[in-house]
């Protein structure tokens, strides 16, 4: 299953500057594994040492936050847009 992953500026060093890349997988976990296989180092910026989404990284499958779906087990149907969005802090 092919999906499109939107990459935030801060992670584009892992994708050769690409703002969007194609990936594959039936679940978000599989998509992240595929991303890591093609863009080494990106998974460590999205997942913590326990393999869970980092607290300040939001991931959306379509328009839905995966924390309110099935987390890493969230389905990623063919053609889905996935967005990785780091939280912004400051004032």
Image: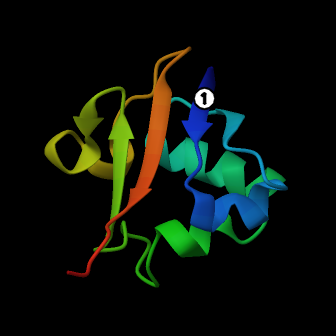
63 left or right, relative to 68: right
**How would you rate the neighbour count of disc 1 (Cα within 10 Å): few for under 14, some for 14-19, many for 20 or more?**
some
Residue at the (24%, 33%) spot, across then down = 64
Is residue 27 something one can see in this rendering? no
Judge left or right: residue 40 versus residue 48. Answer: right
- Residue at the front extreme? 91
Residue carrying label 1: 4
In the image, residue 50 lies at what x, y percent? 40, 80
For the residue pair 3 and 51, the one nearer the viewer reads as 3
Residue at x 36% of width, y 26% of height? 62
Q: Is residue 45 above or below residue 12?
A: below
Instruction: In this rendered view, identify the residue nearer to me: 15 or 2.
Output: 15
Residue 6, given in percent of the width and then of the height, sits at 56, 40
Image height check: is 24 above or below 45?
A: above
Q: Residue at x 47, y 18 (%)?
A: 77
* Quadrant of the image containing the C terminus: bottom left
């Amino acid at each position: 299953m092919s999906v499109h992953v939107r990459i935030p500026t801060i992670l584009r060093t892992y994708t050769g500057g690409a703002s969007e890349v194609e990936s594959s997988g039936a679940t978000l976990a599989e998509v992240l594994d595929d991303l890591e296989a093609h863009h080494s180092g990106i998974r460590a910026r999205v997942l913590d040492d326990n393999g869970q989404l980092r607290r300040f990284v939001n991931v959306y499958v379509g328009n839905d936050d995966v924390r309110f779906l099935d987390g890493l087990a969230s389905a990623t149907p063919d053609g889905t847009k996935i967005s990785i969005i780091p939280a912004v802090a400051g004032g």
